[in-house]
């Protein structure tokens, strides 16, 4: 849009009112200029901060302003910034806010903005360890009803600890990366022997990922009260799942090849500080918790977030899971993950587990939405029990921000391709 003659020009910093990527948000990513970008800069990865539909070259801005933490923002991954700790995270965010909002800084900042269409977004941090939880009571109950119809939907441990498993960090990929349909063993209940081939029950899991910044020493536990000293921010996460491979291999141990082929995360990491207005307490607990998980103390960060998530398949909305319904919070998952003395490393990622609300339109996986394929989705492009080759799944979310604004999370999208 061009400016009106005689008045100020519109710039990328003159955002439409209510832009969910306004200066109250400022998520972090890693970008490189596309091949036709400024001469000599194509291919070099550096830290970017999203503002509207543009990316600020944060390292270049920090250098231009003589910012003391410029080296953290000139890195090719977010890991140095993640490791720097909460006080520095706040300083960096305050500086970015000033650079992007104060009129005196415009002339310096404008040349350092790139349209999103002119950059390539990369995996924003080097993933250290990856753990995935199972923190939605509605999801866990739905799967219990599907697979153990004659038992209580929840196992006896479920309300005493956040159930989880260790996943594969090396196959976490950034939004937009194609996902190759995995092959493996499967055996239906009436099959005489297992067969090998591409999964025929490929699914999604709608999740939130927590990104750990500050490490912890092996042999120590991270209490609930230290959640914000360790966790830098969150992202959307799709834990692609091959249900047929999973159901045959997961007896008696945990998820393995049915999950480890790919996990997609958004290109933008939303700092916890951007979500302060979205904080909500977890739902009421129905069993007493052991002290290390008991978050009833009102001085603790509530650590739940009012995120409104949309799941779409080939552009059609198929579900709207509410994150505020999660039984376990990110602080409780972190406390549980370390209570045995397991250490944290910078770049650790842990997933919330599939987010499902109580309603039928609030389920975060196809196995729940189609009730194990028995009630296929009717889409304009055909019926779906599980994913077909060429299908594109996109997760999006927003949260309430300050003064009625919305805080958008970066989307996570992926397309299924033939092996
Ligand atoms: Ca999962």
Image (cartoon, rainbow, N blue to C red):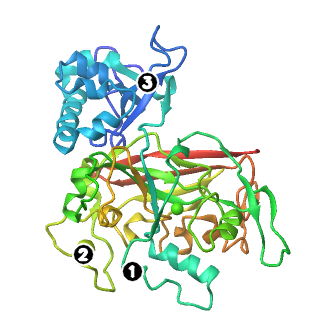
Mark 3, residue position: 45
Q: Is residue 409 above or below residue 383?
A: above
Mark 3 to mark 1 CA distance (whole Å): 43 Å
Mark 2 to mark 3 CA distance (whole Å): 42 Å
| Residue 8 in sight | no
Mark 2, residue position: 294
Most distant residue in the top direction:
39
User: Cβ(mark 3) to ligand 1 < 8 Å?
Assistant: no
Mark 1, residue position: 159
Q: Label 2: few (<14), some or many (≥20) within 10 Å?
A: few
Across and down, in percent, residue 284 comes to 31, 80
Q: Is residue 349 above or below residue 15?
A: below
Most distant residue in the left direction:
299
Q: Is residue 17 above or below residue 319?
A: above
Across and down, in percent, residue 16 comes to 36, 36
Q: Earlier in the sequence, mark 2 or mark 3?
A: 3
Please identify the quarter of the rendering in which residue 222 is found. Answer: bottom left
């Amino acid at each position: 849009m061009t400016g009106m003659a005689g008045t100020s020009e519109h710039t990328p910093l003159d955002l439409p009112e209510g832009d969910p990527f306004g200066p109250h948000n400022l998520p972090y990513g890693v970008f490189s200029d596309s091949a036709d970008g400024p001469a000599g800069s194509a291919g070099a990865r550096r830290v970017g901060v999203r503002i509207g539909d543009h990316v600020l070259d944060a390292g270049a801005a920090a250098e231009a302003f003589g910012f003391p933490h410029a080296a953290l923002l000139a890195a090719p991954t977010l890991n140095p910034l993640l490791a720097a700790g909460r006080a520095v995270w706040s300083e960096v965010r305050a500086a970015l806010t000033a650079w992007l909002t104060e009129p005196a800084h415009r002339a310096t900042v404008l040349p350092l903005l790139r349209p999103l269409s002119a950059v390539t977004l990369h995996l924003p941090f080097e993933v250290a360890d990856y753990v995935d939880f199972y923190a939605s009571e509605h999801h866990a109950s739905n799967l219990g009803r599907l697979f153990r119809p004659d038992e209580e939907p929840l196992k006896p441990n479920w309300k005493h600890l956040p159930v989880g498993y260790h996943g594969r960090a090396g196959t976490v990929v950034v939004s937009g990366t194609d996902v190759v349909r995995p092959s493996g063993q499967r055996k239906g209940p009436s099959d005489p022997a297992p067969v090998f081939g591409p999964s025929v029950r490929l699914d999604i899991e709608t999740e939130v990922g927590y990104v750990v910044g500050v490490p912890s020493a092996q042999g120590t536990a991270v209490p609930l009260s230290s959640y914000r000293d360790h966790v830098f921010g969150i992202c959307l996460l799709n834990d692609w799942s091959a249900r047929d491979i999973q159901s045959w291999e997961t007896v008696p141990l945990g998820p393995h090849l049915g999950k480890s082929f790919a996990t997609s995360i958004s290109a933008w990491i939303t700092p916890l500080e951007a979500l302060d207005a979205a904080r909500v307490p977890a739902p009421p607990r129905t069993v007493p918790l052991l002290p290390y998980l008991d978050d009833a103390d009102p001085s603790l960060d509530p650590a739940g977030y009012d995120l409104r998530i949309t799941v779409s398949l080939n552009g059609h909305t198929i579900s709207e899971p509410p994150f505020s319904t999660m039984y376990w919070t990110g602080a409780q998952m972190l406390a549980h993950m370390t209570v045995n003395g397991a250490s944290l490393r910078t770049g650790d990622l842990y997933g919330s587990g599939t987010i499902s609300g109580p309603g039928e339109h609030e389920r975060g996986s196809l196995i729940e939405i189609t009730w194990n394929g028995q009630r296929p989705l009717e889409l304009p492009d055909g019926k779906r029990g599980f994913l077909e080759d060429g299908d594109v799944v996109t997760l999006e979310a927003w949260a309430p921000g300050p003064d009625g604004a919305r805080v958008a999370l970066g989307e996570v999208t992926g397309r299924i391709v033939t092996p």
